[in-house]
Amino acid sequence: MTRRDELAANLRAVTDRIAAACRAAGRDPGEVELVVVTKFFPVSDVRLLAELGVTSVGENRHQEAAAKAAECRDLDLRWHFIGGLQANKAAAVATYADVVESVDRVKLVPALSKGAHQRSHPLDCLLQVSLDPPGGGEGRSGALPDELPALADAVAERGMLTLRGLMAVAPLGADPEPAFGRLAEIAADFRELYPAADRLSAGMTDDLEYAVAAGATHVRLGRAVLGQRPPVK
Ligand SMILES: *Cc1c(COP(=O)(O)O)cnc(C)c1O
């Protein structure tokens, strides 16, 4: 089997999985968009995915993402930045990303805006909300739910940034179902304040069904499409 055949088969399988999750949740499969997470995988895979009809890819490390996006400029792909963002990298990320899903603090906003202006291209922003148990402290990525309005206002004030919604990752080592249940409530509260920001990015290879049940509009799938990643260096 060629790599192309393997990726094609995996894409068919995840499309079926998303459709089944939508049916189980009483949702239309057309409401859920697939973002294929290509981190650690080569540009040759990104090219095959584009040939196979993938339109959105996700990356979580700036250097790798910047290099791949530059090598794939000829492809009609939307690049989603989904990783933890350092303030000193945020402007650079905004020069190639079409969507930044991991906006989690006000400090990033001026830099993202600067990068988007530099490129003269509006940048879609999702606010990453933490689903970690309260007091999770140190390793937390994502804003606390009560920090979202101030963060949303900071994004919405910037002409080149477009507030699109929320993103979340299920807490490590905890049951994703109640966490995504909480996310559904957070997202509903958020949409009352920002009705146009109605996107919800949640769900990875191991938990997409729970995310779809909780109203995800975007799922971010890596291993289900590309296979196991090499161990982190
Ligand atoms: C790596 C990653 C994914 C994809 O995870 P899989 O388990 O491979 O599907 C999704 N979201 C984020 C934020 C990631 O870092």
Image (tube, grey):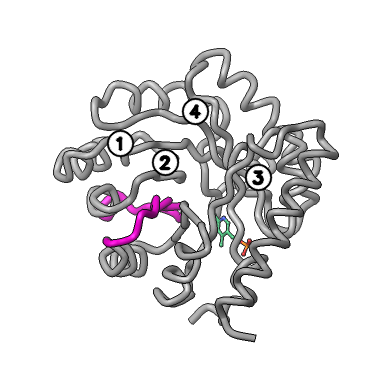
Q: Earlier in the sequence, mark 2 or mark 4?
A: 2
Q: Are marks 2 and 1 in contact (CB under 8 Å)?
A: yes
Q: Earlier in the sequence, mark 4 or mark 3?
A: 3
Residue 131, disc = none
Q: Residue at x 36, y 54 (%)?
A: 76
User: Is disc 4 surrounded by few (<14), some (14 to 19) or many (20+) residues within 10 Å?
Assistant: some
- For ligand 1, tell me if the residue under mark 2 lies within 8 Å: no
Above or below: residue 87 compared with residue 109: below
SS for callout 4: helix
Q: Are marks 1 and 4 in contact (CB under 8 Å)?
A: no
SS for callout 3: loop
SS for callout 2: strand
Q: Quadrant of the N terminus?
A: bottom right
Q: Earlier in the sequence, mark 1 or mark 3?
A: 1
C-alpha distance separating marks 2 and 1: 8 Å
Q: Amino acid at mark 1?
A: Val
Which residue was labeled with disc 1? 109
Which region is colored magenta?
74-89
Q: Amino acid at mark 3?
A: Asp
Which residue was labeled with disc 4? 147
Which residue was labeled with disc 3? 132
Q: Earlier in the sequence, mark 1 or mark 4?
A: 1
Residue 67 position by quadrant: bottom left
Residue 172 position by quadrant: bottom right
User: Is disc 1 surrounded by few (<14), some (14 to 19) or many (20+) residues within 10 Å?
Assistant: many
Q: Earlier in the sequence, mark 2 or mark 1?
A: 2
C-alpha distance separating marks 1 and 3: 23 Å
Q: Amino acid at mark 2?
A: Val
Left of 114 or right of it: where is 21? right
Q: Position of residue 188 (x, y in %)?
A: 64, 21
Residue 103, disc = 2
